[in-house]
Amino acid sequence: MTDAPRPPLPPFTRETAIQKVRLAEDGWNSRDPEKVALAYTVDSRWRNRAEFATGRDEIIAFLTRKWARELDYRLIKELWAFDGNRIAVRFAYECHDGSGNWFRSYGNENWEFDESGLMSRRHASINDLPIKESERLYHWPLGRRPDDHPGLSDLGL
């Protein structure tokens, strides 16, 4: 059984790469591991910081752990570059831990897609910055970032 195509499909144009990035952002802001995992191939390979995952089951387990400890998670992604079936993004997200300590995490991701638009590889490098709650920049209700909310460049990030 094969997965249904996940448009936009490679090779990407600037417009379709931006669409793909926003769809990924929307998925991650859902904080639904099973839904998010469907955007990846069944044998997708990840590097996230120092953790490695292969396949949807490991991706689901990773995301479940992530969102259990990164509370009130809100993410913004922005296209950095694209070519053929690859996209590079930069991102920043805000969350807090169980003790109420807030963080803004900055990073870069390199993505590679198969012909049906599923991500087959994801390599993420991430740095965490402790912030005060008063320094937060993301205040939309949990879920999808509103279309009129500033992006990373607009926020000076």
Image (tube, rainbow, N blue to C red):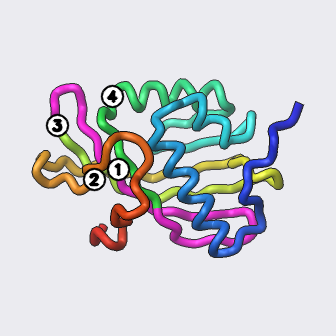
Rendering coords of residue 152 (x, y %): 36, 66
Q: Give the residue type that dot 2 points to.
A: Tyr
User: Under tag 3, what secondary structure?
Assistant: loop
Rendering coords of residue 155 (x, y %): 28, 68
Q: Mark 2: few, some, or many residues within 10 Å (few <14, many ≥20)?
A: many
In this picture, is 102 found above or below 93? Answer: above
- Identify the image quadrant of residue 84: bottom right
- Would you say residue 79 sits in the magenta stretch? yes
Q: Which residue is mark 2?
A: 138
Task: Kindly indicate whether the residue at mark 1 contacts the one at mark 4 (C-beta within 8 angstroms).
Answer: no
User: Under tag 1, what secondary structure?
Assistant: strand
Q: Give the residue type that dot 4 points to.
A: Arg
Using the numbered discs, state the Cα–Cα distance from disc 2 to disc 3 in whole angstroms: 15 Å
Q: Mark 4: few, some, or many residues within 10 Å (few <14, many ≥20)?
A: few
Using the numbered discs, state the Cα–Cα distance from disc 4 to disc 1 in whole angstroms: 14 Å
Q: Give the residue type that dot 3 points to.
A: Asn
Task: Kindly indicate whether the residue at mark 1 contacts the one at mark 2 (C-beta within 8 angstroms).
Answer: yes
